């Protein structure tokens, strides 16, 4: 007979069988001797857990909705919470399928998982809303690698980090919510504070990261390379990730800019990226997408001229409504930068460059804001101005890039790599949102249970801007604290809704 530890340590949860109020799941539990065994564990039904009166999670939510934020710190913590997970034992489920056919809806689950132990310098946050980032798409299709390798490597670095190495991964790199508890050494934040979180997780024990925190050798993206992410009712963050919540936005609006807004800020504005200045011409790929919709706003706000590339008339219209006059519909123009799998077509690069010059009155881009990768990179290097910068943070269509190096060196162009944002850049990007200088680009919102569908939309490029997810927030539109600032910017804040 197996003797379970007093509180089963639930490591893998699967095969839910549900009744109205209870659900049994197969869980992996640790015995007193340290062995892992499968047991059937009975939980309250997930829906009942979140909604029936009197549960711990519901009491926390009731206090937040009643604006009784001072009470939040004295309410008991729940033992478990609902989170969106991928499972290690499913990491090979899409083997052999082309990327396009890998379906995030099959891999993303909503599970009850234990609340992690709180460590020094950390905070537990009640998550009101989160958003889909492309990294959750990558995680859910297990490309380019399953994220469990990240968790395992992180887990090896310290006993505290070992908490992250689990056979399930709670994903998500954005949140807005309320601080539930803070760990030892946290003085700037307290229970009841309304916050958003950026996704930079660093240790800062090595001097390499002391000027620019992105240079820390232990730099990780929270909710992608760490566990306990934001697509959940509760999240674990390092307290240095916390930032003030924009008060004129609802929970789902406030959660949505986080990762992409900070990334676009470093990539385009910061001197660590392209160091954009007034008057620059900026070619922005995917200008109505997650990153692009923020890059477009920053270019316009910073006195530059964006040339927006999109793939449909609706997306072109959204760019124009942001104030961008120069838009290229790449589908309508039919650009084919690759003749076949191995060869690019420089004539198409030239045709693309001519189109840009036609729009700009003859100017080439000072900056090319790159992220599609393999499919566009040759064209991006070609069209950049003499002395211009191609700044890249991703490779959605493939990471083995090729370009004609003669155009780079003979014309003294630079390729700059950029990744997320350091603490300071993330804070400054958030400040733009707080001040109403840059606005969320939320086009649609899903409940937590439908996160798989939300990620599927982003994977199929069927979305505009950002796709939000309600975690604890029972409905959209809650949490606005500064209606006057909101009213002043309502048109911009809601521009992407329903398009
Ligand atoms: N390094 C980092 O810190 C970081 C941070 C954020 C995101 N990323 C990465 O950046 C990429 C984009 O993220 P996102 O949030 O902006 O995604 P997104 O919301 O899907 O937007 C990307 C846009 O790029 C365009 N696009 C996609 N494939 C293309 C192709 N083959 N050729 C030309 N344009 C293409 C699409 O616009 P149209 O169809 O309208 O042209 C799409 O809307 C992802 O790979 C993501 O993982 C990296």
Image (cartoon, helix red, strand yellow):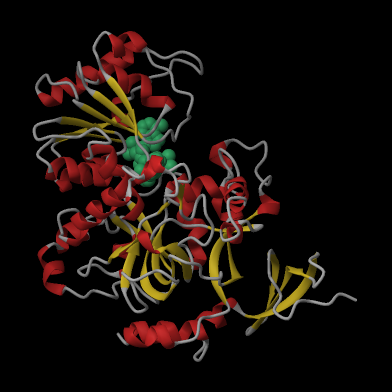
Q: Position of residue 38 (x, y in %)?
A: 79, 67
Compared with residue 411, is residue 138 higher up or lower down, i.e. above or below? below
Q: Is residue 377 visible?
A: yes
Q: Which is more toward the observer, 107 or 485? A: 485
Displayed-image quarter of ligand 1: top left
Q: Is residue 420 visible?
A: no
Residue at the location (22% across, 70% down)?
A: 247
Q: Position of residue 94 (x, y in %)?
A: 65, 43
Q: Which is more toward the observer, 317 or 16? A: 16
In terms of image quadrants, where is residue 124? bottom left
In terms of image quadrants, where is residue 442? bottom left
Residue at the location (45% across, 52% down)?
A: 203
Q: Which is more toward the observer, 339 or 200? A: 200
Quick one: which residue is furthest to the bottom in this view?
54
In terms of image quadrants, where is residue 239? bottom left
Q: Which is more toward the observer, 416 or 377? A: 416
Left-right relation of 360 to 1: left
Q: Position of residue 252 (x, y in %)?
A: 33, 66
Compared with residue 274, is residue 188 higher up or lower down, i.e. above or below? below
Residue at the location (19% across, 46% down)?
A: 297
Residue at the location (47% across, 29% down)?
A: 399
Left-right relation of 163 to 254: right
Q: Position of residue 95 (x, y in %)?
A: 67, 39
Name the quarter where the N terminus is drawn.
Answer: bottom right
């Amino acid at each position: 007979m197996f003797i379970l530890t007093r509180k089963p340590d639930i490591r893998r949860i699967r095969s839910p069988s549900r009744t109205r109020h209870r659900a049994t799941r197969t869980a992996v539990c640790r015995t007193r001797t340290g062995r892992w065994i499968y047991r059937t564990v009975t939980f309250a039904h997930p829906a009942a857990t979140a909604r029936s009166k009197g549960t711990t999670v519901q009491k926390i939510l009731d206090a937040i909705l009643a604006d009784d934020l001072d009470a939040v710190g004295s309410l008991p913590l729940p033992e478990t919470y609902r989170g969106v997970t991928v499972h290690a034992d499913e990491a090979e489920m899409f083997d052999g399928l082309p990327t396009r056919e890998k379906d995030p809806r099959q891999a993303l689950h909503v599970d009850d998982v234990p609340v992690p132990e709180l460590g020094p310098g950390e905070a537990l946050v009640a998550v009101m809303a989160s958003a889909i980032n492309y990294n959750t798409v990558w995680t859910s299709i297990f490309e380019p690698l399953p994220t469990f390798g990240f968790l395992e490597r992180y887990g090896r670095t310290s006993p505290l980090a070992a908490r992250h190495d689990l056979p399930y991964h709670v994903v998500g790199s954005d949140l807005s919510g309320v601080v539930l508890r803070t760990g030892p050494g946290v003085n700037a934040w307290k229970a009841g504070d309304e916050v958003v979180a950026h996704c930079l997780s660093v240790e800062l024990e090595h001097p390499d990261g002391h000027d620019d925190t992105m240079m820390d050798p232990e730099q990780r993206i929270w909710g992608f390379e760490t566990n306990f992410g934001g697509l959940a009712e509760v999240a674990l963050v390092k307290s240095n990730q916390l930032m003030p919540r924009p008060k004129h936005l609802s929970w789902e609006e406030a959660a949505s800019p986080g990762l992409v807004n900070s990334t676009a800020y470093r990539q385009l504005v910061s001197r660590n990226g392209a160091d954009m200045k007034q008057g620059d011409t900026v070619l922005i790929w995917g200008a109505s997408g997650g990153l692009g919709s923020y890059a477009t706003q920053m270019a316009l706000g910073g006195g530059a001229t964006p040339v927006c590339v999109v793939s449909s008339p609706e997306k072109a219209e959204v760019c124009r409504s942001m104030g961008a006059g120069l838009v290229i519909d790449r589908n309508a123009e039919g650009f084919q930068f690759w003749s076949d799998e191995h060869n690019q077509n420089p004539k198409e690069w030239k045709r693309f460059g001519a189109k840009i010059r036609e729009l700009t009155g003859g100017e080439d881009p000072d900056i090319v804001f790159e992220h599609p990768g393999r499919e566009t990179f040759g064209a991006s290097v070609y069209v950049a101005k003499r002395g211009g910068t191609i700044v890249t943070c991703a490779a959605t269509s493939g990471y083995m890039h090729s370009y004609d190096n003669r155009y780079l060196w003979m014309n003294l162009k630079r390729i700059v790599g950029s990744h997320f944002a350091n603490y300071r850049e993330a804070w400054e990007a958030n400040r733009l949102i707080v001040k109403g200088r840059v606005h969320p680009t939320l086009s649609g919102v899903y409940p937590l249970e439908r996160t798989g569908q939300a990620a599927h939309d982003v994977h199929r490029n069927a979305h505009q801007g950002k796709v939000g997810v309600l975690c604890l927030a029972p409905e959209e539109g809650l949490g606005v604290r500064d209606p006057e600032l909101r009213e002043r910017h309502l048109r911009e804040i809601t521009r992407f809704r329903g398009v």
